[in-house]
Amino acid sequence: MDDIGMHGSRFLLESWLDFGELVERQPELKRLLFDPVTGLPTTPLLFPRIATLLEERGEVSLLAVNVVRYSRIEEIYGWQAFDDVMRHVADVLDEIAGETLRDADVIAELMNSGNAFVIVLSPPRTTACIDPSSRVMLARRVEARVSEKLAERIEPALFAKFGCYVGAATVCADENLRLERMVYDALEMALEDSHTREAADAVERVAGLRDILAHERIRTLVHPVFELATMRIVGYEALSRGPEGSEFERPDKLFTVAYDADFVMRLERVCRKKALEAAARMPEDRLLFLNVEPEAVGDPQLRDAVTSEMLAEAKVPPDRVVLELTERAAIADFCLFRATLDFVRALGFRVAVDDAGAGYGSLQCLAEVRPEWLKIDISLVRGCDTDEVRSSLIESLVMFADRLGARLVAEGIETQGELERLRALGVTHGQGYLLCPPLDDFPADDEVPAVRFRKEGQ
């Protein structure tokens, strides 16, 4: 967002204070008064506008747009990613001015928060004050529009870790209080209102997840794993999804809420049950890659599950099941972890480690698990045909897997260039949308897109 083409927030503020020339002479002043990331004015520049409205109307309403979970975004993706999120939010707020908001509503950065914006609402046309219920309805509309527009702009995995809640408050004129104190008290109330919204949303999500678990409303998709030399299907990864069209349809949202609510093991059990039910239809001589959260490896019911559900109820031989350890969370107890893996391996199950090259403590995980299968994270596969660093890292994993005696699977293959480079580097197996997307049922071998990449004579 730049100065040219703005709806007017910054120009209005500069005209109120008439300090344009002063800012030009002292650039450090501009850094204090305007946020360096979004370019928006900071809270102190709102005071003249608020003072005028209080004098004319006796009160003024504020909205606080609070970006939550931002520390997780910084922790996982870096501060640059968080800055990008804040720029996107600022751009979206600017876009909805004149739509959900009015052109005369003024947007600024809440400088004492670092992850919030404040909107000074223009007065209503027909009444002296904004009705409290109308103020709340406007906050909800802004919240919905911001989330809707950001979902189109932000990469899905990042958007899943992001939340935006809008709180509202009103500043009432009081000759006995300083303007600054009244404004900051109101902003604290608006932020508290946004936190209340976040807490209520979290309660609703947990209730929704509880209902999904109680009624076992988990779907299983299957994603074929191919031998890259022949494009022969060697197995299928079972992918768990929540109810179609709901916010829980994506697994990252499903498991994020499960971790927050301490429902991971319950969710794992339902996902495992549904995947094994689907495996009853799996063609013979194929493997089932079954995702297992690291925390679930310590589940007391896991040993019972592999001896009852997997061996008896689903009638899937152990040598056709690969337990794929995901790395959404760190492994807390490696002694218990190894003991459980020794037990399942003694029964004939094999083990895969997902997300090689990413995740929490992946090197220690590889050293402890010694997997039969190793999956290369999509972040390394993406663009490996044009990025020599990624290509070199994959080449190192090929040598490592060879020494370990593990089979290597490249995840997320999306272009023919990536496929050709992976083959040239010696990666033996792969999966991705280029070869076949996840499906509701097991596909016929000759109906998958991968057949067009078979080498001549095969």
Image (spheres, grey):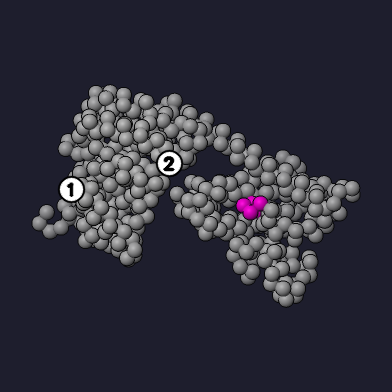
Q: In 3D space, how far apart are the residues under numbered discs 2 and 1 (Cα atoms)? A: 33 Å
Please state which of residues 137 and 369 is positioned toward the viewer in this rendering. Answer: 369
Label disc, if present, on residue 232 of the rendered structure: 1
Judge whether residue 258 is colored magenta: no
Judge whether residue 116 is colored magenta: yes
Label disc, if present, on residue 346 of the rendered structure: none
Residue 181 pos. (x, y %): 80, 50
Residue 86 appears left or right of 385 = right
Quadrant showing the C terminus: bottom left
Please state which of residues 88 and 138 is positioned toward the viewer in this rendering. Answer: 88
In the displayed structure, 355 sits above or below 213; it is below
Name the outermost residue toward the right: 175
Name the outermost residue toward the left: 457
Going by the numbered disc 2, the residue's amino acid type is Ala
- Span highlighted in magenta in the image: 113-117
Residue 135 appears left or right of 252 = right
Label disc, if present, on residue 329 of the rendered structure: 2
Please name the residue shown 40% across and 35% down the image.
Answer: 333
Please state which of residues 405 and 81 is positioned toward the viewer in this rendering. Answer: 405
Quadrant showing the N terminus: bottom right
Please name the residue shown 64% across and 49% down the image.
Answer: 65
In the displayed structure, 374 sits above or below 321; it is below
